[in-house]
């Protein structure tokens, strides 16, 4: 299986994603980032939430800076990149662009937790069969 460091997702704004001002509501940017994250995992041959998994990946930090609006039917791209991989967490950066122009930049950190019925959630090392499918992305040329 390939080792993955980034994924590009192309998408179009749907009407239900816009607010009364006619622009994408800020909450959708988090969904776009998560949609790209799931596509990245699929490209690595994995699912972030397989049935009967012994580990899970809750979100522990997330942010966005907004630069320009997106509107209904705009086509845009989400570039999600692995910025850091720790023993128990993965941090992504997301770059959302329209026609090559920055729309929003964000980050997301997920933690690996053990899923055991009847016990509190506890962080645990990312299993090697998952961690081995990902690597930190090279810096962007303008970074």
Image (spheres, rainbow, N blue to C red):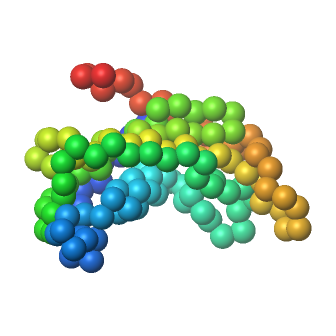
Residue at (60, 63) in percent of width and height: 49
Relative to 132, is 15 on the left or the right? left
Q: Position of residue 85 (x, y in %)?
A: 58, 33
Residue sticking out furthest to the front:
21
Image location (x, y in percent) of residue 122: 80, 50
Q: Is residue 4 above or below residue 142?
A: below
> The C terminus is located in which quarter?
top left
For the question of whether residue 2 can be seen, the reply is no
Which quarter of the figure has residue 9? bottom left
Q: Nearer the viewer, residue 128 or 94?
A: 94
Q: Residue 23's image quarter?
A: bottom left
Between residue 120 and residue 11, name the one nearer to us.
Answer: 120
Q: Is residue 137 above or below residue 130?
A: above
Q: Residue at x 72, y 68 (%)?
A: 52
Task: Please tell me which residue is depicted at 18% across the width and 48% down the height of the picture.
Answer: 68
Between 66 and 100, the one lying in front of the other is: 66
């Amino acid at each position: 299986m390939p080792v993955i460091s980034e994924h590009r997702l192309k998408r179009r704004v749907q009407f239900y994603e816009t607010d009364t001002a006619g622009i994408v509501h800020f909450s959708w940017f988090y969904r776009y980032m998560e949609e790209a994250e799931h596509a990245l995992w699929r490209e690595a041959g994995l699912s972030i939430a397989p049935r009967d998994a012994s580990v899970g990946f809750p979100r522990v930090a997330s942010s966005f800076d907004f630069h320009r609006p997106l509107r209904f039917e705009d086509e845009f791209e989400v570039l999600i990149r692995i910025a850091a991989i720790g023993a128990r967490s993965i941090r992504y950066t997301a770059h959302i662009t329209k026609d090559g122009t920055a729309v929003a930049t964000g980050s997301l950190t997920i933690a690996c937790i053990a899923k055991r019925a009847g016990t509190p959630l506890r962080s645990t090392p990312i299993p090697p069969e998952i961690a081995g499918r990902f690597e930190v992305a090279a810096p962007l040329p303008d970074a």
